[in-house]
């Protein structure tokens, strides 16, 4: 066994998981109010009114911790030439044909896309959410704005949830990834395989 | 409230059909508000407060006769006074009783996420069942007439019930019973349309050549209708919408997006699962380190 | 009302003037909407403000507050000038052809006999020429220059449309349009109803305004017919009952009058009121005055009064002057009044010039307030900040509050505007220690009587001799009182034509005032109510709305005075031969076969007097006909003349510009100290008028949460033009100042109050609703009558609330 490579600090991991939990709760409560098929999810939160009461507060938690996380990871998410090459070969990535992929830094292009998707959609969710937040803020906004806000909120949430589904699946699919967020480390092989540029930077090899 | 479950025509956040065994169903009803007969006495406001046991704040005067100044969770109907001069030197004081229009295609019901919080009865009454209301305010975004109000006390949505509890046992709504001039009448929608025709003929004979019935088709018609002296200018009446309909944004949100987005999310999960069982996991061989 | 609420549905034209039925009488106004919906009736509103009634109208004409006689005089001039009158009607049923004394004249705004010192007329010249036969001389050709028609025509020829525009500010075209619509109802099959209220009564010439309206109706033949009439909309659910029962300082029940100081002799008193016919063959129903009077005395004093003591005539007060509201507060202010019992009345709010009322109340030793509510009057001594800025330490008046029941907490009858006595039943128990008004009054009476019995005192007779035969002496029941008012036989009452036939047995209730006798055999508390509780039972409690003739005469619903007649003078709806002028709206007709009058209504006539007998429809007048020439009945003169309000924007009366004496009503009583207080247009340039709103009822509903919600805060209304001039926006606070005080309220800026051009000058009107005070659940406000002058109508002494002067500033 080679020496594991440190990928996330304990603080980073905690931050991520708070965001993740908030997302799950906000997502479930939001879906409950989105389509009757999901309304049963309100039971998880103590019924409809409690779901309506809690959802926005969870959203605010999600927003604050996501912003903290985004600040931590901001600098790793600039696109590079290697990312573009990687994206060009996305088909091979999906088919697990990883041989000959360019050397990638801490995050690959897919992860960066997710990052920026979240950076856009979470503030949008917050802003649109405040506009329709009953009974505190909604009465102060005109109805036309409420109508725009509910559509923006739904679309932003949908895109975000889709992104997170991809994110979660990727973690399951790419073996050895989960421990990065549970224990903070990845194997040397994992690091070398998926994020060689980052590996080099971390180890000097 | 109060009508039987068998008389429900539509129910919020419910995707299965409503009960449909009754042979003839209830006859559609309507309240007709004849603005040309309304003296703005606000007796209907009092009747509404009394029957429904509502007491709004003792407010202030804002330089108008309108009081309470707007609909609230405790004021389900208010008079709106407009001073207009359609013809020069011919002042008119148009007084419109505002409140829920009981649309045949109710935007509130369409927008509501709580199953059964809003129902539409077979007689056309659109009713809020506050015990199911979760207080999200989506009905407000759905309503083309700006009617529902969320209570600051209990965060439930409220509006005129068309006295569904009275109508269910064969009584007229409280406002109708109290109206001293017959400006408010109630009956089957057909009868009300017929009554309105007589009123419109009378108004035309008095020189209101554009007198008309306000029963806007954009919301499938309403179960509260107006006789307007100036049917061609509904906006004279405290901005009564000319051609109301459910906002396209609300239709988009509660129309195609709702199933499509849900389907999209399901699809994403399925895609991942089948990718996993077909392409398999992405595993890193330990020997790679020797490369 | 000569007619009644339901009957309004029979009309072709509604003139609302001096009233605002839609707002102040919304339930009665339904009959206007019925007439409009089912008869294509038109509604005309003439008012200083574009009211909610105007909002319902087919045509609205603006008018300056207080100028209605000029407007209506102009209508009379139009009708006579264009000969648009009901010729047969005026010829037969009015005094058109009567000849007036040669001495009578009108010049310079004054009728003959004016005494400027006393501000009173010697009315001796205001009379008819009486022929040798004792009857009035007439000229059926109407050519004699001394006939009423010619005199009236000359009098109103001065009221040209231009003069109307000058005085009223009503544009000439609008005025002529109203005239033309009114004139159309001169046709025998067309009728107009006039609906008026306090907008006419509350002027220094209020009684004459109403008379002018009645004259218009008479010219058109619109009195006594279905859908016509002069219809006073009473401002209070039982104010009709108040006057019927004589709750005025100069009256007794049934419009019997108290004697004055000079009338110490019973025979002279009753003789003067027992009016003999002035034309042959006329009924002159007041010939029965002794029957009404004696029966009333028997009801009051029972066995104690007999022919020997002139039925207790010496026990009646003899008036040295009027003791109306204004006089009482004047006397009170001069320290001449020790105690005041204030029952169901809130004078601090509803009497003019609040500061005078407050000062007067402060001079009392004690005041008893009997009221269901905590009125401003009962708290007048308390400091309520800016709204009632008094110093309680300086007020020594002891106030007793005796809480009384309200109408819903007792049985009883209310008399509506249409003279219907409608019984009502208790709906709720009164709260806590509340007592009914009768219990309170009985309690006071029994204690006072006991004191007289024990201590004697000056002139105890009227008190000691009162008949008090109620089963529970401390609580005369409403039922006992109603039976007493309706009357009973004390001995068998027999048919005068057949003395053997007993009409009413001793002890039985009377069936009507025809049963009344002047020999002490009947007792009746109010002759007009006779029959309302007969042997058939309580007819006021009837609720049968059957309308067998389809003209809205529901004779088995409640009971209308007199004799259950629904339309007064209804004989006038038929031509002289007894046939209805409009068969589609027939209410009575002569049935030759049966030899009597009959129909949908109870005939207001001698039932078996055939048309050829020549008896005329106005049976209460000794002439048998209606009067255009009021003889000596009015204080200001036989023909109504326009006089300016006491606070007027005009320097002179445009009708008599050279005579300063007649700018305002020359016969109105004005207390000496009041003259200097009257506002002048240089300091107070705007015309102001006070009024009610539909959301409130006087000073009651400020105590009701529901009404407080509907209209929570005091406001005043000003036109857009004036608001712009003064930089006032809707919702700003403004101070309205008169020469008597000021109020501060929210400004409602409106298109509904337009500036009028009066005598060439632009004149603005300010509107002040009355409903706020410093008690109750609405937001505290100023009492509107802080602003009003202490002057009143010359006949009724009703205060001039509807037209005075103010200034205005933004706060």
Image (cartoon, coloured by chain):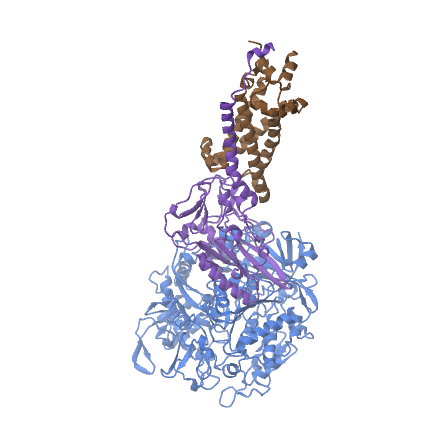
Position of residue C313 in the picture relative to residue C655 (left or right) = left
Vertically, is C159 above or below C728? Answer: below
**One can see residue A62 in this view:** yes
Quadrant of the image occupied by residue C505: bottom left
Q: Nearer the viewer, residue C159 or C503?
A: C159
Position of residue C9 in the picture relative to residue C739 (left or right) = left
Q: Nearer the viewer, residue B156 or C772?
A: B156
Q: How many marks?
A: 0
Which residue lies at the image location 58% right of the left edge and 88% below the top edge?
Answer: C144
Direction bottom: furthest residue: C132
**One can see residue C633 in this view:** no
Q: Which chain did the renderer colour blue?
A: C
Q: Nearer the viewer, residue B236 or A35?
A: A35
Vertically, is C418 above or below C141? Answer: above
Percent from the top left, x then y, of residue C469?
A: 34, 65
Q: Nearer the viewer, residue C634 or C298?
A: C634
Percent from the top left, x then y, of residue C624?
A: 47, 81
Percent from the top left, x then y, of residue C34?
A: 48, 66
Percent from the top left, x then y, of residue A136?
A: 55, 38
Chain A drawn colour: brown
Chain B drawn colour: purple
């Amino acid at each position: 066994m080679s020496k594991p490579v440190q990928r996330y600090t304990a603080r980073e991991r905690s931050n991520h998981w708070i965001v993740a939990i908030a997302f799950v709760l906000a997502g479930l409560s939001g879906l409950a109010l989105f389509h009757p098929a999901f309304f049963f999810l309100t039971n998880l939160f103590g019924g409809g009114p409690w779901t309506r009461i809690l959802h926005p507060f969870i959203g605010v938690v999600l927003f604050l911790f996501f912003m903290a996380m985004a600040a931590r990871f901001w600098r790793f998410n600039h696109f590079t030439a290697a990312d573009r090459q990687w994206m060009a070969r996305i088909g091979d990535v999906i088919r697990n044909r990883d041989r000959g992929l360019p050397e990638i830094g801490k995050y690959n292009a897919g992860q960066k896309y997710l990052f920026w998707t979240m950076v856009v959609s979470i503030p949008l969710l917050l802003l649109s959410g405040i506009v329709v937040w009953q009974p505190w803020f909604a009465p102060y906004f005109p109805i036309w704005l409420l109508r725009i806000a509910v559509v923006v909120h739904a679309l932003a949430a949908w895109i975000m949830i889709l992104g997170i589904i991809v994110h979660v699946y990727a973690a399951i699919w790419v073996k050895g990834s989960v421990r990065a967020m549970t224990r903070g480390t990845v194997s040397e092989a994992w690091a070398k395989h998926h994020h060689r540029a980052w590996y080099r930077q971390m180890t000097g090899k | 409230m109060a009508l039987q479950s068998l008389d429900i025509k539509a129910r919020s956040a419910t995707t299965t059909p409503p009960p449909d065994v009754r042979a003839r169903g209830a006859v559609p009803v309507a309240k007709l508000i004849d603005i040309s007969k309304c003296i703005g006495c606000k007796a209907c406001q009092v009747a509404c407060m009394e029957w429904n046991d509502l007491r709004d704040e003792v407010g202030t005067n804002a330089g108008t006769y309108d009081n309470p100044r707007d609909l609230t969770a405790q004021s389900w109907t208010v008079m709106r006074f407009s001073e207009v001069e359609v013809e020069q030197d011919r002042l008119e004081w148009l007084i419109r009783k505002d409140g829920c229009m009981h649309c045949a295609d109710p935007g509130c019901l369409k927008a509501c996420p709580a199953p059964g919080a809003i129902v539409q009865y077979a007689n056309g009454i659109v009713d809020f069942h506050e015990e199911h209301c979760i207080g999200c305010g989506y009905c407000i975004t759905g309503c083309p007439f700006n009617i529902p109000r969320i209570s600051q006390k209990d965060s439930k949505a409220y509006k005129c019930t068309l006295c569904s509890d009275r109508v269910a046992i064969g009584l007229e709504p409280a406002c109708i019973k109290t109206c001293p001039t017959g400006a408010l009448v109630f009956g089957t929608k057909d009868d009300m349309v017929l009554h309105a025709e007589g009123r419109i003929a009378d108004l035309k004979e008095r020189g209101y050549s554009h007198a008309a019935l306000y029963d806007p088709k954009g919301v499938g018609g309403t179960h509260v209708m107006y006789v307007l002296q100036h049917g061609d200018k509904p906006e004279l009446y405290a901005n009564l919408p000319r051609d109301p309909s459910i906002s396209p944004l609300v239709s988009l949100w509660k129309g195609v997006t709702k199933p499509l987005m849900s389907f999209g999310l399901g699809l994403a999960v399925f895609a991942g699962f089948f990718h996993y069982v077909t392409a398999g996991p992405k595993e890193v061989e330990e020997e790679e380190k020797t490369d | 009302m000569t007619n009644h609420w339901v009957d309004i549905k029979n009309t072709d034209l509604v003139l609302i003037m001096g009233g605002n039925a839609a707002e102040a009488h919304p339930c009665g106004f339904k009959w206007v909407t019925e007439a409009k919906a089912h008869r294509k009736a038109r509604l005309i509103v003439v008012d200083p403000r574009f009211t909610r009634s105007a909002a319902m109208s087919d045509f609205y004409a603006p008018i300056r507050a207080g100028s209605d006689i000029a407007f209506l005089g102009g209508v009379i001039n139009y009708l006579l000038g264009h000969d648009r009158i009901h010729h047969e009607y005026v010829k037969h049923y009015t005094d058109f052809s009567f000849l007036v004394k040669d001495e009578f004249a009108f010049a310079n705004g004054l009728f003959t006999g004016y005494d400027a010192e006393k501000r009173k007329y010697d009315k001796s010249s205001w009379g008819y020429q009486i022929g040798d036969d004792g009857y009035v001389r007439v000229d059926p050709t109407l050519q004699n220059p001394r006939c009423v028609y010619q005199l009236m025509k000359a009098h109103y020829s001065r009221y040209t449309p231009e003069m109307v525009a000058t005085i009223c500010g009503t544009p000439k075209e609008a005025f002529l349009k109203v005239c033309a619509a009114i004139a159309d109802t001169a046709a025998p099959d067309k009728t107009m109803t006039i609906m008026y209220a306090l907008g006419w009564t509350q002027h220094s010439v209020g009684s004459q305004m109403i008379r002018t309206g009645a004259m218009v109706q008479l010219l058109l033949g619109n009195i006594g017919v279905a859908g016509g009439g002069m219809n006073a909309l009473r401002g209070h659910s039982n104010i009709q009952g108040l006057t019927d029962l004589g709750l005025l300082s100069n009256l007794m029940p049934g419009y019997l009058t108290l004697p004055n100081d000079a009338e110490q002799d019973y025979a002279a008193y009753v003789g003067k009121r027992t009016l003999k016919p002035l034309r042959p063959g006329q009924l002159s129903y007041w010939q029965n005055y002794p029957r009404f009077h004696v029966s009333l005395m028997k009801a009051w004093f029972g066995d104690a009064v007999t022919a020997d003591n002139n039925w207790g005539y010496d026990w009646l007060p003899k008036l040295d002057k009027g003791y109306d509201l204004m006089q009482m507060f004047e006397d009170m202010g001069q320290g001449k009044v020790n105690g005041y019992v204030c029952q169901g009345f809130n004078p601090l709010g509803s009497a003019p010039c609040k500061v005078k009322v407050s000062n007067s109340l402060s001079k009392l030793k004690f005041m008893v307030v009997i009221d269901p509510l905590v009125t401003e009057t009962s708290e007048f001594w308390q400091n309520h900040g800016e709204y009632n800025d008094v110093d309680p330490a300086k007020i020594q008046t002891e106030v007793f509050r005796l809480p009384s029941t309200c109408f819903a907490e007792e049985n009883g009858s209310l008399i509506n505007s249409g003279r219907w006595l409608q019984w009502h039943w208790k709906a709720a128990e009164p709260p806590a220690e509340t007592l009914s008004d009768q219990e309170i009054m009985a309690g006071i009476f029994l204690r006072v009587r006991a004191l007289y019995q024990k201590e004697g005192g000056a002139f105890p007779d009227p008190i000691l001799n009162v008949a008090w035969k109620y089963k529970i002496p401390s609580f005369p029941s409403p039922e006992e009182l109603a039976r007493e008012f309706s009357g009973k036989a004390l001995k068998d009452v027999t048919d005068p034509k057949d003395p053997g036939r007993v009409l009413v047995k001793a002890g039985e209730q009377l069936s009507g005032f025809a049963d009344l006798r002047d020999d002490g055999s009947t007792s009746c508390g109010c002759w007009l109510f006779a029959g309302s509780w007969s042997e058939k039972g309580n007819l006021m409690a009837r609720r049968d709305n059957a309308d067998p003739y389809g003209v809205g005469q529901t004779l088995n619903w409640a009971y209308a005075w007199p004799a259950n007649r629904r339309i007064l003078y209804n004989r006038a709806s038929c031509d002289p031969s007894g046939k209805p002028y409009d068969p589609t709206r027939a209410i009575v007709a002569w049935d030759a076969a049966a030899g009597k009058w009959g129909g949908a209504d109870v005939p207001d006539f001698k039932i078996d007097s055939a048309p050829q007998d020549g008896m005329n429809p106005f049976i209460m007048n000794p002439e048998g006909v209606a009067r255009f020439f009021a003889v000596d009945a009015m204080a200001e003169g036989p023909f109504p003349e326009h006089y300016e309000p006491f606070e007027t924007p005009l320097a002179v009366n445009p009708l008599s510009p050279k005579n300063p004496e007649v700018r305002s009503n020359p016969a109105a009583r004005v207390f000496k100290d009041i003259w200097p207080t009257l506002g002048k247009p240089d300091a107070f340039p705007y015309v102001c008028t006070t009024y009610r709103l539909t959301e409130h009822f006087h000073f009651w509903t400020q105590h009701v949460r529901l009404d407080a919600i509907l209209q929570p805060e005091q406001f005043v209304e000003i036109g857009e033009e004036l608001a712009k001039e003064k930089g006032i926006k809707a919702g700003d606070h403004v101070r309205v100042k008169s020469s008597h005080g000021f109020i501060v309220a929210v400004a409602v800026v409106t298109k509904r109050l337009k500036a009028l051009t009066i005598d060439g000058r632009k004149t603005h009107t300010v509107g002040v609703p009355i409903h706020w005070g410093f008690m109750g659940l609405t937001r505290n406000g100023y009492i509107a009558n802080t602003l009003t002058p202490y002057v009143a109508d010359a006949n009724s002494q009703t205060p001039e609330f509807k037209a005075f002067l103010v200034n205005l500033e933004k706060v």
